[in-house]
Amino acid sequence: MKTKLTLALERTLYDYCREAGTMAVEEVTMPNDAGIVDTLSYQELPSGDIEWRCYELKVTKSDFHSKAKLSFVGHYNYFVLPLKLYQAVATEIPAGIGVLIYRPFTKELLATATETPTAPGYLTVMRPPRRRELAVPASQLTTRFIAAQAREVHKAKQMATGLKAFSTERLYQELKKRHQHYDVYDPEANFYDQFIADTQTTAVTALQDELDALNLEHHQLLEQLRSQRS
């Protein structure tokens, strides 16, 4: 499971890439056992050349020191880090690797914004990257990029389809996974309590609608009887 901070970095980086005029996708598996790029971006330059950028997102020291392979296979490669983590590991970052620093929007910044931000924070370039040759064939990068985009489209279509795409058994399994987040002291924050409350409210509303319909029908019958008697 991704942490809240990791998701914030992902979302902010995605917006950052879009604003820069590049296409980006998360979690792209590389060929030749080159690992998984956290975020890969693609941009066609005015010259017609294609530029690839790879981003590794790290939020803790242990995450930074993980034995997982760093997939810096692009023309330009970056770490995306919170400021505190950068300050702790700055001397360990290899030469030529760029660094983007993530900062969350504060209430003060949000109060002065003329438009509502689409991301939870913003990125600044702490260290520019150095261009290098691709570590894998460009054609394979293109293929993996398209495959990752297709995966995201499939996920989006599943979301659009809603719960109809999942069996009752699958939904039950997903609900069970969330029991660890149950907070007995804050019922309003619990999915289970919200679900039960919504179900009860729906049931009461449905019963009330049915009762109102029966009362209306009863009233109409009484009116018919009165008119027949008169």
Image (spheres, grey):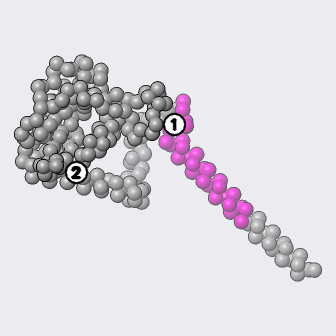
Residue pictured at 17% horizontal, 40% vertical? 53
Residue pictured at 60% horizontal, 50% vertical? 200
Residue 68 lies in what quarter of the image? top left
Residue 148's tag is 2
Tag in front: 2 or 1: 2
**Rendering coords of residue 142 (x, y %):** 14, 52
Under circle 1, the secondary element is: helix
Residue 189's tag is 1
Q: Quadrant of the C terminus?
A: bottom right
**From what the image shows, is residue 114 above or below residue 223?**
above
Residue extending furthest toward the front: 46
Of 76 and 159, nearer the camera is 76
Residue pictured at 19% horizontal, 47% vertical? 43
Crowd rating for badge 2 (residues with CA inside 10 Å; few <14, some 14–19, many 20+): some
**Rendering coords of residue 176 (x, y %):** 41, 43
Task: Examine the structure image and report whether residue 211 is included in the region drawn in magenta.
Answer: yes
Q: Quadrant of the N terminus?
A: top left
**Rendering coords of residue 179 (x, y %):** 43, 38
**From what the image shows, is residue 25 above or below residue 154?**
above
As measured in the structure, the alpha-carbon distance from the residue carrying label 2 to the one carrying label 1 is: 34 Å
Of 107 and 199, nearer the camera is 107
In this picture, which residue range is highlighted in magenta? Answer: 185-213
